[in-house]
Image (cartoon, rainbow, N blue to C red):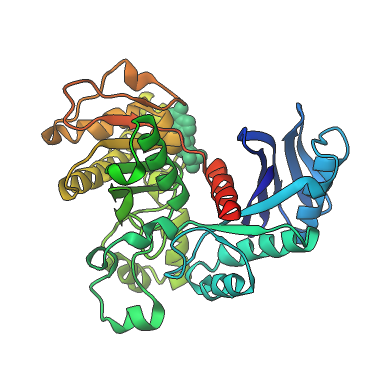
Amino acid sequence: MYIMVINCGSSSLKFQLISFPEETVIAKGLIERIGQEDGAQFTLTAGGENFTKQPVDAPDHTKAVTAALEALTAGDCAVLKSKDEINAFGHRVVHGGEKFTHSVIIDDEVLECIEECSPLAPLHNPANLAGIYACQTALSDVPNVADFDTAFHQTIPKHAFYYAIPYEYYEKDHIRRYGFHSTSHKFVTEAFAEKNGKKVDEVSVVTCHIGNGSSLTAVENGKSVDTTMGFTPLAGVVMGTRCGDIDPAIVFYLMENENMTAKDVDVLLNKESGLLGFSGISSDMRDILEASENGNERAEISLKICAYSIAKYIGTYVALLPKTDAIIFTAGIGENSHEIRKMICGYLKGLGLSLDAEKNMTRGKACCVSDDNSSVPIWIIPTNEELAIARETRNELSE
Ligand code: AMP
């Protein structure tokens, strides 16, 4: 069985073709600059061949999906005899609001609900919908499944998802904590349970997805009970370009004193803050680590601000969970940076965490990196959001 995983941005289409039951990636590609004046570009790896940034006729998402399917069925990178070999599409959908607690097969009612959630994710949901419509147009008989970034967090209890603002704004504007990175938090929780021979509802963990975007989740007996991102992905820990938690009064102070509009502050806090904003160097952790090693003081402080913000939430979640079977690090920084893991754990001495210096050098492999003295085991589990979406898609179809 072949499942094509689709992740659409406003001007991009990322895809992977995954075969089951082997769970092998047959092809992966990216079409960027969709609809832009100077033309779209296609990067593809398939069948042992690859090409990088080739021009492609993709003025819209429908044409981009057509181009992807053509490349998979004809030419040097062909891996399928016909596009009819594809059994299903699995779509990443950013916002499912309060409506979706798990993945669903997409029908007209689901499409309407995704549309209704668009005001909550105005940049993402319309792009995700464009990808779904494009796949429906390209292969009308093939089922489409939606996997929501928000779904795993729908088990968060009321006292953790409401904000203490007048209740009418929850009723009217649906303002509450939603949380994101569902696919990743769920995937690493399940992988941890499997590796430890347990059922997922037997494990309680703190999952730390630390990448360009970052969030932590407290998982009790396999269910999300709290997470750091909130109404939007801006909340929580310090990220590549997002500020994470700040005093909300900073927003109106900036608007009044710097003469900024709401849009200006939005851009400042989402795109120009975090590691990039404070260091003034880059949003990429590797650049900050290098600059810090070379003696750049602001880079060094950026690392500390970021690690400290993560440590605070780990401490909080371990204190709130009745038991914690593991702290799990995942995503680009969480999986790869021994330095950041060391800094984070260094802030948590009172918790009795203890990394094994040698094991902490591990990269790209699921394993425990703490020593026997650690009060809570510390794990690295590489995330694989595409595989997770493909599995969810297969599961929905087999139900
Ligand atoms: P992601 O959003 O999960 O792709 O993660 C991207 C982030 O991971 C970027 O900030 C990268 O600099 C960071 N990253 C990737 N590899 C490493 C590494 N070996 N050491 C430190 N950071 C890394």
Q: Quadrant of residue 367?
A: top left
Farthest left residue in view: 350
Q: Taking 95 as reference, is 340 above or below it?
A: above
Q: Does the rendering let one see residue 227?
A: no
Q: How many marks?
A: 0
Q: Residue at x 33, y 36 (%)?
A: 198
Q: Taking 134 as reference, is 46 above or below it?
A: above
Residue 392, percent from left and from top? 54, 50
Farthest top residue in view: 358
Q: Residue at x 44, y 24 (%)?
A: 363
The residue closer to the viewer here, 4 or 293, is: 4
Quadrant of the rendering where the N terminus is positioned: top right
Residue 30, percent from left and from top? 69, 44
The residue closer to the viewer here, 82 or 125, is: 82
Q: Quadrant of residue 248?
A: bottom left
Residue 341, percent from left and from top? 31, 31
Q: Quadrant of residue 58?
A: bottom right
Q: Is residue 165 left or right of residue 29?
A: left
Q: Residue at x 41, y 58 (%)?
A: 269
Farthest right residue in view: 75
The residue closer to the viewer here, 349 or 197, is: 197
The residue closer to the viewer here, 130 or 262, is: 130
Quadrant of the rendering where the C terminus is positioned: bottom right
Q: Is residue 147 left or right of residue 181?
A: right
Q: Taking 4 as reference, is 37 above or below it?
A: below
Q: Is residue 396 left or right of residue 208?
A: right
Residue 11, percent from left and from top? 67, 57
Q: Is residue 149 left or right of residue 274?
A: right
Q: Residue at x 28, y 18 (%)?
A: 357
